[in-house]
Image (cartoon, coloured by chain):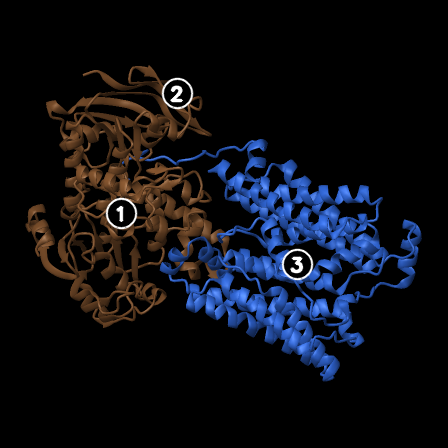
Amino acid sequence: MRALLEMQSISKSFPGVKALDHVDLTVREGEIHAICGENGAGKSTLMKVLSGVYPAGTYEGEILYDGEPARFRDIRDSEEKGIIIIHQELALVPQLSIAENIFLGNERSSRGVVNWHETNRRTEELLAKVGLKEAPTTRVDNIGVGKQQLVEIAKALSKQVKLLILDEPTSALQENDSRKLLDLMLELKSQGVTCILISHKLGEVRYVADTITVIRDGSTVSTLDSANGVSEDRIVRDMVGRDMTQRFPEHDRKPGNVLLEVDGWNAWHPEHAERRVIRDVSFNVRAGEVVGIAGLVGSGRTELAMSIFGRSYGRNVSGSVRLRGKPIDVSSVDKAIEAGISYVTEDRKTLGLVLDETIRFNTTLANLKAVSAGGVLNRNEETRTAENYRDALAIRTPSVFQKTVNLSGGNQQKVVLAKWLYTAPEVLILDEPTRGIDVGAKYEIYSIINDLAEQGKGVVMISSEMPELIGMCDRIYVMNRGSLVGELPAADATQERIMSLMVNE
Amino acid sequence: MAFAHSEGVVGPKKTTQGVREYVMSHLREYGLLIALIVVMVFFQIVTDGTLLRAVNVTNLLLQNSYIVIMALGMLIVIVSGNIDLSVGSVMGFIGALAAVMMVQLDAPMLVTVVSCLIVGGFIGAAQGYWVAYWKIPSFIVTLAGMLVFRGLSLWLLEGQSVGPFPREFQVIANGFVPDIFPASWSASLASAFGERQVNILALVAGIASAALVFWMGHKQRARNRAYGIEDEPLSFFAARNFIVAAALIFITYKLSTFRGLPNVLITMGILTVIYTFITSSTVIGRRIYALGGNEKAAKLSGIKTERLTFLAFTNMGVLAAAAGLVFAARLNTATPKAGFALELDVIAAVFIGGASMSGGVGTIIGAVVGAFLMGVLNNGMSIMGIGIDYQQMIKGLVLLAAVVFDVYNKQKQG
């Protein structure tokens, strides 16, 4: 097969950092080419160079596309040549219909008047191609993230796509939706569309990719032919530049007495007061224990955690919470914190951090009392505190006065963790603590969780990644449609058993 | 931890900063100061020195005092992610209330002042209640408030102007702090400087505050160095503090050759110091920045965001009342038109001072400098005899330029 795309010796610098250092990438026509690498390795930068977000002239090196040198000025320019990129954060307008979104900026119209008949007919064709059974007039905010992803692909197909770039397309998707998407990629490939897939999830990379290019620290490390069977360990080794014999740090825990008990917990939807989202949930956590909560997105895991954490979710909540056998008041966030409970959100950017503020600002935010006297802040003490956590959690930054928006995902997650550790909690609820962060940083987060358990804290870990739950937890609860449907000791837990409880109707 | 260098910091690494880089990253703060100086020098030249005449400097301070007082509260409201369009009307209403109480009902001054401040607080609280606890956009609540209180002052004054105020009340705005030093000293100083008179207290206060600026700057710098925080190149530190100190001494010298320190300047100065302290060094100040920066994250950190919003508006109400008293005392009468469209000047001052419309960003000192920048523009253009038509256009463009500059800077850093 001939090469559709050749990127030769691409280099790109930002003030103070070299993001790409002579990267080579060759994508053959009609293949699915995966690009793997840790966060910050340069994958997204490379794709931005390719799609013209960074216009020709702002980088060094040559791009050959379809046999000709390409010098894209902007995204429009690259799209005209059939290069279409679908970003991690979806770029759909939620208030518009599927059809309106697909033809946004590319309206089927004559003399400025939209031809709705034509628009909807074409949309139906495209939706059939991607296997989405929705009416073209359905508003995008009425369909789930998985289906929105398909709408994005339909939109790409509407533009005569030749090279489709998917940037972490499954990071927000459930297992079954992810599978559908990957199968669609294989289907598109059989129709002759070339794909570049950027993904952290090695299982899916191995499932669809013909070729895998691994990038580390802005350079190409290896290009692997997937047909010959590449092991995950090999990819991981190339990604992190070291052997990764263990994905999870070892632990030897001896859980103590029951620390937290939640009994008969119910929560109702904030807008639809009659909808009970959490149904009669009871669970407990022992001192020094890590307890997992598995479940599909929408099964109520986050809602359970947030309703316990100061009624941050739900208009009506009922049930009791006890700590060391004594009932505690968790009716507001500050009371829950006071009682010794912390909740580390799954969405660090919108719910966890004040992004435009510094590491120091964020570290002390939930416990300003400890760094103030009579309502006046002691900023030296704050700086010391933030620096202590920076060292203890290995937050990689030259100074705690760095704005958190400039940190990588893993370091941001550590700042959020630092904030909650500083409230000196007895029980930590961690909601997807490793979402969207790379392998090395994940290992560090796991180590921190083990340390916490060793100190006798109770940890509740909500996660969509089953290997993570099995590898880290002592016990795993499974949630399904608002109820706890199972409890498995980690020793007996297998992905199959958890999954069957999760999806059981 | 098990693995080193798994992730690096994205963005420029900061080691030893060059002067150039430092200037680029602090362009906004210097820009504002430089803009103020440039505007002052410009008007000083084109008005043949009228701008910085003692009487005009005094006038400038008096004229802008109520804007500055309201800008302090507005900064907090804007940092919290809201806006208050009602302050001009509230200010006018409080002036009317004071006039009715003192002129028509012969209420004692202290009773009037205290009850006016309390009423202002209630007005702010009433608006803050809807914004904080009912989540009604502040733009709408305070737009309603703007109409309601404009109407109320008309009703209260029955469409008439009410005045004059008792002498003791006028002193709030038009009075000066008497010199405490012997008259013979000031007479000999006056002859030495070749002036008609010199108020030594004013001069001493100026020199003392200049020294204070230097001392506090030095302390801050020492602390920053101890923690290895990026610090200003020495030349910049010295130049900036020298300019500020020189300006303080220059202004107080001018004041001393006229009638001394205006009472309002003292009020303004004390309030500015208090609010700078609150916003930069207290728990409640920190929480307001967190609220404006990311309300959801603040809430999940145990911060009572509703109560903070409520307090921000209550505080704004009290300051609008204070400004209303100063304004009425200065004009010596309350008119139904008092404070008309002033909210826009106040809001403009805060944005020129570097605050962000989306909340979480802005400083008290920026807002104060922003207010004076607008004040000097107004004053300078008036002296030049530029019509109100051009004045409005120029002020509008200055506001736009300041915000464009902010956004451009942010994108460049982006």
In this view, the residue in front, B376 or A477, is B376
Q: How far apart are the alpha carbons under marks 3 and 1?
A: 50 Å
**Could you tell me how far apart the alpha carbons at marks 1 and 2 are, in whole angstroms?**
46 Å
Seen in the picture, residue A192 relative to B201 is either above or below; the reply is above
Residue B68 is marked as: 3
Label 2 environment density (alpha carbons within 10 Å; few <14, some 14–19, many ≥20): some
Chain hosting mark 2: A
Callout 1 amino acid: Ile
Label 3: chain? B
Element on which disc 2 rests:
loop
**Label 2 belongs to which residue?**
A71
Secondary-structure class at tag 1: helix
Image quarter of residue B202: bottom right
Is residue B251 visible to us here? Answer: yes
The secondary structure type at the circle numbered 3 is helix
Mark 1 in CB contact with mark 2 (< 8 angstroms):
no
